[in-house]
Each structure stands twice: as C-alpha cells, then as structure tokens.
Amino acid sequence: MVTNRLWRTLSAFNCSTRRWAPIPLRNTQSQVTQRLSPTSRKIDTLWTQRLSIISWNIDAFSSRPVSRAKLILSHILEGPKSPDILFLQEVTPDVRASLLDDARVRAAFLVTDAEDQTSFEDVPFATMTLLSSARFAFGLDSQKESDGIEGGENFMLGRISRVALPSKYRRDALYVDIIPPTAPGTFFRLINVHLDSLGDTLHYRTHQMEILANVLREPGCSGGVIAGDFNAISPEDDGLVNKNGLVDAWVALHGGADPDGATWGVGVERRNGLGPGRLDKIAMMGLKAKEMEVLRPGPIEVPRPGEEPVEIPWSDHCGLRCTFTI
C-alpha cells in the first residue's frame, strides 16, 4: 500500500524552522481496478469557479537539474498568471528538496511529498503536486481564516493518494480530491501523471488511460482533470483521450491540427528523426476548458571543462497552462 501526505507551510516567516503542519489522510488501495460506475450526482449548476493549472515535465536527466527546476519555478510563480494548481513530472530527490526549501512555495502552497522521500525511493524520479493555499484548504478552520466567512469559498481537500499503475517503469498516478464549497457531497479529482515512455509500451499507456478515466467515474466523483506527460508518441496514443470519454483541452480550444500545440522536440533536431510532438496533455471530464497555452522553456548555460559553455533549454518538454471552470 502506497499512501501520500500533503503538508501545508505554516507561514512565510517560519522558513528557517522548517516546520510543516501535517494533513490527515485516508488510506487507499495501491492498485486500482477498472470501475464502470456512472458519473455521480450533479451539483448546483448556478455555482461556477474558475481554476488554473500548469503542468510541466521538468526533465530529470539533462545537466543541472536543480538549477533548471528553479528557473522553471521562477518562470511559473513570478509571471502574471501564477497557477492555482501545479503538476510537476520527473522530479528527482534533489529537486524535491529544492522545491520544499523555496520560500515562495512554503508561503503560498500546499505540497505533496513533503514528509519524506518514500515516493522517490527505487525510482529515478516522481511527480509532485502543488496547490495554492489561497484557493484550497485542508480544514474548516483554515477555510474560515482565509475567507473570513462561514463556509468560505475555498475548495476543501479530500483524499490524497499515490496509486500504482500497471507499468514497465513503475509509474503511478498522484490523486488529489477537491470538494467544492457549495457541494460537500461530491468531489472533483486532480490526477498528475507520467505515463509509460517509448513506443514499446503503448499497451501499458492504453491500460493506464482506461484506469484513469474510470477513476473519474467513481461514485461521488463529478469529474476532474488528468494532466501531465502522456508520452503520446504515436497516432494510437492520440486516440486514447477520446476513446475513454475524456475531453482533450487543447483540441477543444485549438483543434487537433494546430502546429503550436507541440510540447516536446520543439526547435530541436534529433538524430532518430522524431519531430515535435504533443506528448503532454490535459484531459478533462465534467469541466470546461476556457484558455490554454504552451509555455516554452528558456535557456541555461552548462559549463564544459576546457571548452566554451553550451546553452540547453530548462527542459526537453514545454509546459502547459490551462484555465477551466467547475
């Protein structure tokens, strides 16, 4: 059984003490099975909230991973549109430590995997999810304090869990359930994923997408978002979102033929002949995408002993930013 803890920073002034407040969790099975339950009850259709999400595979294997991750984080947090939800993939233990030690993160976000490195053991990297503490709360007291009114407007956090998927590379899905303030009897699910890589694992990705789509149909769940690195490198991959009854946010807003939708191999010549691809995606059920854009990485210098330094991008993937309504 693999469970995950979500922790909230106490305040911007406590950074030197490195103290964190734990959030109690409910256990969940480490291996989910496919469930064909219909989507649960409808919620009040007059209530609408807008949320924003950024998903970025920050590239574990290129040089200077911590420095590159810091540049990506600064680009995200210091821009005009800091997200409510941040999904990161290919986070190494060193990058995890850097994120948890960042004063901006500690002051303003709820962060998964802050308690220990359990999810990072025996794997080269893992996923992490960050949630803005201005939009999400993990207890009624926090909600009242942040909003100043009974009940508040923040989403409450429900189950947080890391669930193993059938995988060649020990990939998993990181779930966070969010409960709307006006409908405590239902929830929406945020799923951070890094599906299996390379062409010989299409059958794994097919199974993974079936499982994830059915998770959004579980009793009590009114839908949600699946975002991250889908490793969609083949035409068969491109059909998995629609096949499982999900909405591809980029296609819904820009159409499938938009050449600006590529998130991998952009501006890079590869010896294997692979061109740019839309490997990273945001898929939805029960939500409506409003805006979406691709975030291009900037450059960083990599020193070379005895030679001139070279510039590489912050990541071999672009990020995705999407605004949607519940």
Image (cartoon, grey):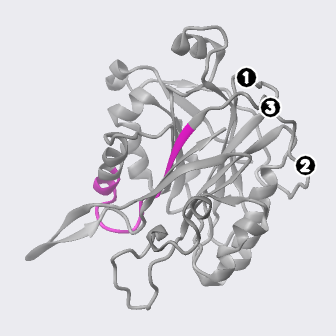
Q: Amino acid at mark 3?
A: Ile
Q: Quadrant of residue 42?
A: top right
Q: Nearer the viewer, residue 312 or 220?
A: 220
| Number of other residues with Cα within 10 Å of mark 2, as a class: few under 14, some 14 to 19, many 20 or more | some
- Residue 231, given in percent of the width and then of the height, sits at 57, 71
| Number of other residues with Cα within 10 Å of mark 1, as a class: few under 14, some 14 to 19, many 20 or more | some
Residue depicted at x 56% and y 38%: 51
| Number of other residues with Cα within 10 Å of mark 3, as a class: few under 14, some 14 to 19, many 20 or more | some
Q: Amino acid at mark 1?
A: Thr
Residue where numbered disc 1 is placed: 182
Q: Nearer the viewer, residue 287 or 266?
A: 287
Residue where numbered disc 3 is placed: 43
Magenta highlight on residue 60: yes
Q: Is residue 305 visible?
A: no
Residue depicted at x 54% and y 28%: 135
- Residue 123, given in percent of the width and then of the height, sits at 55, 61
Magenta highlight on residue 129: no
SS category of the residue bearing label 2: loop
Give the quarter of the figure containing the C terminus.
Answer: top right
Counting residues from the start of the chain, the first of labels 1 and 3 encountered is 3
Q: Is residue 19 visible?
A: yes
- Residue 157, given in percent of the width and then of the height, sits at 66, 30
SS category of the residue bearing label 3: loop
Q: Amino acid at mark 2?
A: Pro
Highlighted magenta segment, given as a residue range: 51-69
Q: Is residue 108 left or right of residue 67?
A: right
**Residue 38 bears which disc, if any?**
2
Q: Is residue 103 left or right of residue 137?
A: left
Figure check: 32 above or below 299:
above
- Residue 19, given in percent of the width and then of the height, sits at 44, 24
Q: Disc 2 to disc 1, how far (Cα)?
A: 22 Å
